Image (cartoon, rainbow, N blue to C red):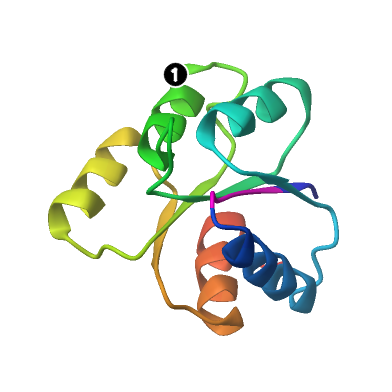
Amino acid sequence: MNVLIVDDYKTMLRIIRNLLKQLGFNNVDEATDGAMALQMLRVGTYGLVISDWNMEPMTGLQLLREVRADPKLKPVPFIMVTAESKSENVIAAKEAGVSNYIVKPFNAETLKNKMTSVLGDF
């Protein structure tokens, strides 16, 4: 399965890629903002998106809304990653159709649990 990770912070992309590798996911693509991710999603095939919330020019929430508004992309599981655990953010993400939510910092175990809840056992 191809996984798309989206974050404007290169170090975070590397951390998530390494965690995914530990979990057996080697087909991982990276985007550094929501607009780039949306282009990649429209031309590629992904089984999961893991996206940061705070990015410019398109935030993770805006990306999520675009994905859910596109009939072809709508079924793709989408996990939001953020340093913010404010309840209004969680509610906004749920209303936009997020599959699951991870608050930074997190480890491989947390990522695996969130992915299992979205994808089933892998």
Residue span colored magenta: 4-8
* Closer to the camera in the image, 47 or 41: 41
Residue occupying image coordinates x 32% and y 34%: 96
**Outermost residue to the right:** 26
Q: Name the residue under label 1.
A: 69
x and y, in percent, of residue 11 in the image: 61, 66
Residue occupying image coordinates x 64% and y 47%: 48
Residue 5 among magenta residues:
yes
Residue 16 among magenta residues:
no
* Closer to the camera in the image, 32 or 21: 32
Dominant secondary structure (helix, strand or loop) of the stretch shown in magenta: strand
Residue occupying image coordinates x 56% and y 32%: 75
Q: What residue type is labelled 1?
A: Ala
Left/right placement of residue 82 relative to residue 113 reads left
Residue occupying image coordinates x 47% and y 78%: 106
Image quadrant holding the C terminus, namely bottom right
Q: In this view, does 108 lie above or below 25?
A: below
Left/right placement of residue 113 relative to residue 43 reads left
- Numbered disc 1: secondary structure: helix
* Closer to the camera in the image, 73 or 116: 73
x and y, in percent, of residue 18 in the image: 73, 73
Q: How crowded is mark 1: few (under 14 residues within 10 Å), some or many (20 or more)?
A: few
* Closer to the camera in the image, 44 or 31: 31
x and y, in percent, of residue 100 in the image: 42, 56
Number of numbered discs on residues:
1
Q: In this view, does 20 lie above or below 90?
A: below
Q: Is residue 49 above or below residue 68?
A: below
x and y, in percent, of residue 24 in the image: 81, 71
Q: Is residue 70 above or below residue 41?
A: above
